[in-house]
Amino acid sequence: MLDRPIPDRVDACDWPATIAGLDDTGVALAGPVLNDADCAAVVALYDDDTRFRSTIDMARHRFGEGQYRYFSTPLPNVVRTLRAAFWPHLLPIAREWAARRGQPAPWPDDLDEWLEQCHTAGQTRSTPLILRYETGDWNALHRDLYGDLVFPLQVVVGLERPGIDFAGGEFVAVEQRPRAQSRATATDIPQGHALVFTTRDRPIRTKRGWSSAPMRHGLSTVRSGRRHALGLVFHDAT
């Protein structure tokens, strides 16, 4: 399957299982979308300063330990292709989640049209990014909110092999449940696989109907090795 074009790989993901996982915990592995050569090529981009608009030292901002870099535009082809390929699969989920809670669903069928709405609202800076973690690094729980316009789902793709290239470094999502203790979900992301997760909150059924469960995400401590990941956010930043 991984010798097929990237859009075909995304189409071939197990979307019914992904939707079920998102409804269950707000986090779901979708399947493999990049092959080993693709992953190596994306990792190699990290040291090319011309590809990025901004570099964030996480310790400096008390976000954790590690570093990430936001791509400048135009995005690399693999990043642009992945984001476009995921959009038609994530959009129906986002609209269904909005309908359950009686909220507006401002996202059009076309990703470029949505991004143009972001730009008109002053959210003009690109948000896809690569994250790099060395031994001892971690990422504090957070949300990727960059303005008033937000898409409720995002994707992270693992670029190395957990348990081989690095140890630890599990993706962690924490759900704040109504009138209950928070729930954490930890996931290892295999190399080349995509994980879909909740940006801000997700609908949960209660005795009174649908409610919103706030969620945050982060990364557990990398115990050894180096870990890279590709993050795909579907709204741009102010």
Image (cartoon, rainbow, N blue to C red):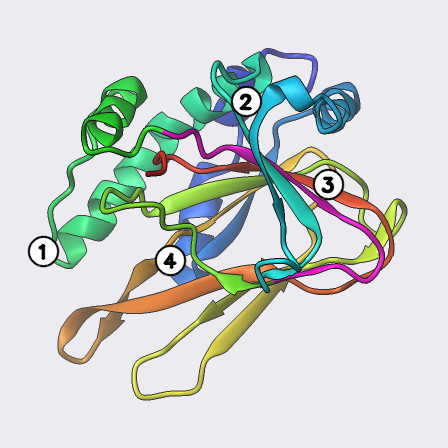
Give the quadrant of the C terminus. top left
Answer few, some or many: residues within 10 Å of disc 1's Cα (few below 14, many 20 plus, some between 14 and 19): few
What residue is disc 2 on?
A: 79
* Element under disc 1: loop
* Element under disc 3: strand
Q: Is residue 142 above or below residue 120?
A: below
CA gap, disc 1 and disc 3: 38 Å
Labelled disc at residue 23: 4
Q: Residue at x 80, y 49 (%)?
A: 162
Q: Given the image, on which type of amino acid does mark 3 rest?
A: His
Q: Percent from the top left, x then y, of residue 91?
A: 29, 34
What residue is disc 3 on?
A: 228
First to last magenta residue range: 125-139
Residue 1 visible in image: no
Q: Nearer the viewer, mark 1 or mark 2?
A: 2
Answer few, some or many: residues within 10 Å of disc 2's Cα (few below 14, many 20 plus, some between 14 and 19): some
Q: Percent from the top left, x then y, of residue 217?
A: 51, 60
CA gap, disc 4 and disc 3: 27 Å
Labelled disc at residue 102: 1
Foreground pick, 50 / 177: 50
Residue 121 visible in image: yes
* Element under disc 2: helix
Q: Given the image, on which type of amino acid does mark 2 rest?
A: Val
